[in-house]
Amino acid sequence: MTMTAPPATDGAQDAPLMRAARIVKQFPGLRALDNVDLDVRSGEIVALVGHNGSGKSTLVKILAGIYKADEGEVSFAGDGGETTQLHIIHQDLGLVGELSTVENLRIAHGRGAGALSPTRRKEEIAHANRVIGRFGEGFDVTQPVASLAPAQRSIVAIGRALDGWSHARNVLILDEPTEALHATETEVLFDAVRRVAAEGAGVIFISHRLDEVLALADRAVVLRDGQKVADVPTAGLGHGDLVEYVTGASASTSLGRPTDRPLGDVVLDVRGLSGAGMSQVDLTLRAGEVVGVAGVLGSGRDLLPALVFGGVPSSAERYVLEGRPYQRRSPAESVRRGMAFVAGDRARLGGVTAMNARENMTLPELKSITGPVGTIRPKLEKALAKRLVERYDIRPARPEQAFSQFSGGNQQKIVFAKWLRNDPRVLVLEEPTQGVDIGAKQAIYDEIDAAAARGVAVLVCSSDAKELVRLCDRVVVMRSGTVAAELRGDELTEAALVLHGHGLVPASEEGEERSS
Amino acid sequence: MSSETSAGWTKALSFRNISAIYIFIIIFVIFSTVTPRTFLQEGVWRTLLDAQAVTVIAAIAVMIPLVTGSFNLAIGAEVGFAGILIAVLQVKLGVPFAVAIPLTLLMGAIIGLVSGLIITKGRIDSFIATLGLSSILLAGLAWMSSNKQVIGLQDGFRSIATTTFLGITVPTYLMLLVAFVAWYVLERTPVGRRMYAAGYNPAGARLAGVQVSRLKVGALVAGGVIAAMAGILLTSRLNTGEPTVGPGLLLPALTAVFLGSTQFKGGRFNVWGTVIAVYVLATGIKGLQLIGAPPYISDLFNGVALLAAVGLSQWEKTSARTAAIRRSLPLRRRPRPEAAETPTRAESPTR
């Protein structure tokens, strides 16, 4: 079998590869999808955009056959013997981290009697190299995929999807593929996606990042509250227009950068912090200051928060928290001393998913709701949980609902509620708005601003340059495990963050004399 | 969207919540009809209540570490070891039982501490660690007892298990006391809350300031003390240090903990679910024995019940996971819906 599709007639080219027509899905008490149409043609990249809870994931589940639509139907093109197949690549990619690219590509192969036939290693490696090579620069296909860069892992997943296709005219759905990627890596992934489309596939691309949608997609389909509110070509479409479609409100009011805040005393003073591949990091946080951490993947950006918080063993020449030296760091002691840590890996570290929202929110500090005989006082706890749910606008406002059953944005609000209720002195944030819809994002930004206004020192690590510019008074840029530059005031722009992150600025021009 | 499906779940749960009670009623009705003269005797029930008190205590000793995420497969050996130790201390070393009891409880704590340190500091999976420890304890037990019954216990010690208040034996009261304290700590105190969090999500709980390792070790120490208590009561009841009975408690105890987790709390390990599960299982076995089933019926019954209980407790997780598994597999969509399940077929890599 060959990959090249037979030359299609113009008529067939125009017919969609996949068409979902008038899809209705009703859940108890909620119309998740209301007469939604979605089609994708060969060679086209369609972005599916919407808040958490807008119906995106329900639609994808219906396309995948996991849910059954109440009304409407999903049909696939089928000319001759060639029927269109659907392949979904989810955010977690479905790769086995310990296995190599070669092995991951072959997981689904060799069913039936073939499952016991010996594998031919050389041939497989050559094949894997061909699959990967189609997407640009190759890499070592015998390495465990866990050791690859995130963009490379995405390419393995896409390669595997395509490897199973007998022809190119199929549909590929990418669900939030860029969440773990840095800007340059995103570009690598986008190149791969464009190639897939150019070969004749139809691509549906789901993302929260509207600029990516505009950069990659030919057409954007916007869902809001289960209804399709827009189906527009992205050419000539502005960021603001898209925000308006998604939120139903004008974008001009959002994302305002706070004016200069008054800074207080130094709360955290760290000199020569080393550990987990980082060396000699200096960091100072003042009360009411929001300090960002930027850097490309592998720069140490994502390790610094855990290092500062004490989640990862580290050594420091000097580590002073609120005027007191603090050398033997551990999460428990850090929490006791007034630090709070919102981990980036929300699914794994954000909360105890089997427990409910109330139990998650009260976990770090139970003393204030504990009675004289050592019991948690249920009434006090429930009242507190109710207040927090209202205060942080957690939806649905049900403190007894399991953490795992909240949407991503609301899970993050629960995580914020659980930390901010204790009035921390230092708030350490890792990717605070990852996988969060625009509405929740704005709410989280407001909370961070409010915390800083109350005099909390905030350290925020993010792969989103725009976010750092929006939030921070000052940003440290990490490179090769140490601080390479520090930007503040007018120097603090998205472009500057990207340039410094990649070391594209002459060392002499860098704010700090710390060229590696 | 998840909130809407949860409404359906709650409905399903409310039935499952009290399934053990339904099972108990079914068992009761069946045996009351089949063999009313023996099954409905007061003495049968009195014995059952007393005899299973030790099993309940052993089950709670398994459950407490399990809440924090540690399996204790050494529970049977721990109970047996304590049962022989208390007998050997009295008979061979002549220690008065009032001293021997605290010594045995201390030994239980030490065993729990050792297993806790092996698991947390040695980073050995609790399954393997306690399996290994179990074997070591059985060896120690055989060495102390020379694999023979230890007889000649002190009179005061023997009377512990036989003394009754209001027609109920001391072991039963002690069982209720242990259950109440365990319930109180787990359900009502911050320590209990943190223990559940540590068990469900160790990494996440750690970042929330929970000292996971310390809680794990503490839970195993508490479990060790409670297991030693079960051993002491067992020896007092049997009136002899019996080297073979302890290990037999592992299966009924584990079964009860898992069956108990499906009760009341929708999948959480919990004390009262465990207590009820022990008695439901014991009633079923008793009834079968009364209608003349052979002795091995209890092994058969416990084995089947363990698998059913764990299956039941995994049900909820599995249904959520099914979606995740389906996602990771390449989906093929064809006009014929039955073909949608066909996995990706092998194809020649040449192109």
Image (cartoon, coloured by chain):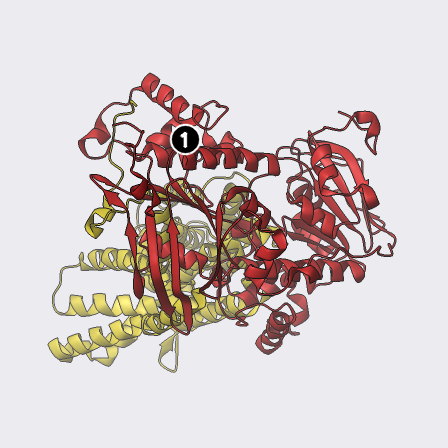
Chain colours: A red, B yellow
- In the rendered image, which residue does mark 1 sit on? A99
Residue B242 or residue A510, whichever sits in front: A510
On screen, residue A345 versus residue B6, left or right, reads right
The quarter in which the C terminus of chain A is drawn is: top right
Taking B193 as reference, is A233 above or below it?
A: above
Taking B246 as reference, is A365 above or below it?
A: below
Tally the marks.
1
Q: Quadrant of residue A368?
A: bottom right
Which residue is pictured at 13% across the width and 76% down the height?
B35
Q: In which quarter of the image is residue A357?
A: bottom right
Q: Which residue of the protein is positioned furthest toward the top in this rendering?
A: A122
Please indicate, yes or no, whether residue A452 appears anywhere in the rendered image: yes
Mark 1: secondary structure: loop
Q: Position of residue A102 (x, y in %)?
A: 38, 26
Residue B8 or residue A238, whichever sits in front: A238
Q: Where is residue A344 in the image (x, y as percent from the top left)?
A: 60, 48
Q: Which residue of the protein is positioned furthest toward the front in this rendering?
A: A10
Q: Position of residue B111 (x, y in %)?
A: 49, 48
Which residue is pictured at 66% across the width and 52% down the height?
A341
On screen, residue A83 versus residue B85, left or right, reads left
Q: Quadrant of residue B32?
A: bottom left
On screen, residue A397 versus residue A76, left or right, reads right
Mark 1: give few (<14), some (14-19) or many (20+) Cα within 10 Å.
some
On screen, residue A372 versus residue A78, left or right, reads right
Identify the amino acid type marked 1: Leu
Q: Position of residue A464 (x, y in %)?
A: 64, 45
Q: To which chain does the residue with label 1 belong? A: A
The quarter in which the N terminus of chain A is drawn is: top left
Please indicate, yes or no, whether residue A100 appears anywhere in the rendered image: no
Taking A98 as reference, is A320 above or below it?
A: below
Residue B273 or residue B86, whichever sits in front: B273
